[in-house]
Image: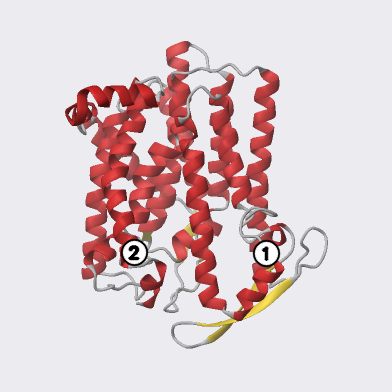
């Protein structure tokens, strides 16, 4: 169980847990309230709370309704069914610390298209109007807050009673177990991977579904869709499409291969993604900004370019790993460091660290276009209010923290080779600055 002890000290865990438990749920509700009912103005919400105090806050917190639970249940069941039933290529994940190799079915792209086609089809044929989702958004977020909390408790119990693989165990501290998770690869039965469901099929998929929902809502209210809304929705959809196109690659990242399935990651994917990640679109529904064709196209092209660079960074590294360094990076042979390390079971293995191409610019250069893309799909909201930019700020903090956590993990894994690597690629995220 050495793994969880090195991630964060108990004190940091307690602090981040308490803040996540106490601050994030109210923040999600306040963000929704501000975007939908207070014109996106933080000062307006602040004035309301100043006058009405805690009682006023309790009054604006929507109670989860039957409609909200129904929408969530139908959506969740639909995504779970697609994950289980749609055909897909068999993909193996990276070898885990205890030597297990998870096997996945890569059907993300199919699930993504079926979901969007169904969503649009239901609206087009008048079977289900997506604006109902927007109109009950507060109740849905409220239900997700409570529902995902119960979900995490069930995961905790499952981790104790029926872990799916040997990649699980207790740190001896119930709170830390609940927060950071008990299992690395929890499954229901042999084939239904819970983390793929929460992170990809529920979380990321909801981002696309809600982006389209906001667009439809604006169309139903105003009879047209403003160019700002179109740019925002297209860029978000391009980003989520890139995510599902590369979903099998995502299964090799820190989220899946190192972070256990606990409150930290599951709550984040079930609540934070649908509410915070989609918030620029939520703001634009009631603020149809007209950018003009020229500016709209400029933002669109810049955003797509950032998403492409982000994709190309990941593709370059994946190609490099797949061919064991026998590939071309930017037209020439890659420069690399051969690093050896010892697994928990005491075997010695080697890894190749790429030091050219995008990965020669900085150790986590791919975070730069990711943050820039988020900026470009938020900037159609212009600068009247700060709140739409919360996601960009949050993402920057999240990714800088992740870069640091990843560096710390690699430092303890590779030792002297990592030092060598850091001498060669000296910047962590932003070349020349950080």
Which percent across, then down, holds residue 243? 54, 48
Tell me which label, 1 or 2, sits earlier in the chain.
Answer: 2
Above or below residue 144? Residue 120 is above
> SS class of the residue under badge 1?
loop
Q: Residue at x 67, y 63 (%)?
A: 319
In the picture of the structure, the residue carrying the numbered disc 1 is 426
In the picture of the structure, the residue carrying the numbered disc 2 is 186
Mark 1, mark 2: which one is toward the viewer? 1
Name the image quarter holding residue 130: top left
> On the picture, is 259 further left or further right than 147?
right
Q: Are marks 1 and 2 in contact (CB under 8 Å)?
A: no
Q: Residue at x 39, y 27 (%)?
A: 42
Which percent across, then down, holds residue 238? 58, 38
> On the picture, is 184 further left or further right than 406?
left
Name, please, the residue furthest toward the left. Answer: 55
> Which image quarter is the N terminus in?
bottom left
Which percent across, then down, holds residue 425? 69, 65
Q: How many marks?
A: 2
> SS class of the residue under badge 2?
loop
């Amino acid at each position: 169980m050495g793994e969880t002890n090195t991630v964060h000290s108990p004190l940091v865990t307690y602090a981040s847990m308490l803040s996540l438990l106490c601050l994030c749920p109210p923040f999600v509700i306040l963000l929704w309230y501000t975007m939908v009912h207070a014109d996106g103005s933080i000062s307006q919400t602040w004035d309301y709370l100043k006058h009405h105090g805690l009682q006023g806050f309790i009054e604006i917190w929507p109670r989860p309704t039957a409609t909200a639970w129904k929408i969530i249940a139908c959506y969740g069941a639909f995504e779970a069914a697609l994950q289980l039933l749609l055909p897909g290529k068999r993909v193996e994940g990276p070898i885990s610390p205890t030597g297990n190799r998870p096997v996945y079915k890569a059907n993300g792209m199919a699930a993504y298209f079926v979901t969007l086609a169904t969503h649009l089809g239901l609206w087009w044929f008048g079977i289900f109007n997506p604006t109902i989702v927007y109109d009950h958004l507060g109740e849905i977020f409220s239900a997700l807050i409570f529902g995902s909390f119960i979900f995490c408790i069930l995961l905790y119990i499952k981790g104790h009673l029926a872990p799916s693989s040997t990649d699980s165990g207790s740190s001896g501290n119930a709170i830390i177990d609940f927060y950071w998770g008990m299992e690395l690869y929890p499954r229901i039965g042999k084939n239904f991977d819970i983390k793929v469901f929460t992170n990809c099929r529920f979380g990321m998929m909801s981002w696309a579904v809600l982006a389209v929902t906001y667009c439809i809502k604006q169309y139903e209210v105003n009879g047209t869709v403003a160019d700002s809304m179109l740019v925002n929705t297209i860029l978000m959809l391009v980003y989520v499409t890139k995510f599902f196109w590369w979903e099998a690659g995502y299964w090799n990242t820190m989220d899946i291969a190192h972070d256990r399935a606990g409150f930290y990651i599951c709550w984040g994917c079930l609540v934070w993604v649908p509410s915070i990640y989609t918030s620029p679109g939520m703001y634009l529904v009631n603020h149809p900004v007209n950018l003009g064709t020229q500016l709209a196209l400029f933002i669109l092209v810049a955003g797509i370019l950032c998403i492409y660079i982000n994709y190309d960074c990941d593709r370059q590294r994946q190609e490099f790993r797949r061919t064991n360094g026998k590939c071309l990076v930017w037209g020439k042979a890659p420069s690399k460091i051969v690093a050896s390390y010892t697994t928990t079971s005491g075997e010695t293995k080697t890894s190749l660290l790429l030091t050219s191409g995008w990965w020669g610019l900085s150790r986590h250069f791919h975070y730069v276009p990711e943050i820039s893309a988020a900026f470009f799909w938020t900037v159609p909201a212009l600068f009247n209010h700060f709140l739409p930019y919360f996601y960009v700020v949050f993402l920057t903090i999240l990714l800088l923290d992740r870069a640091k956590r990843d560096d710390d993990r690699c430092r303890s894994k590779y030792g002297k080779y990592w030092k060598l690597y850091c001498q060669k690629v000296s910047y962590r995220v932003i070349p020349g600055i950080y």
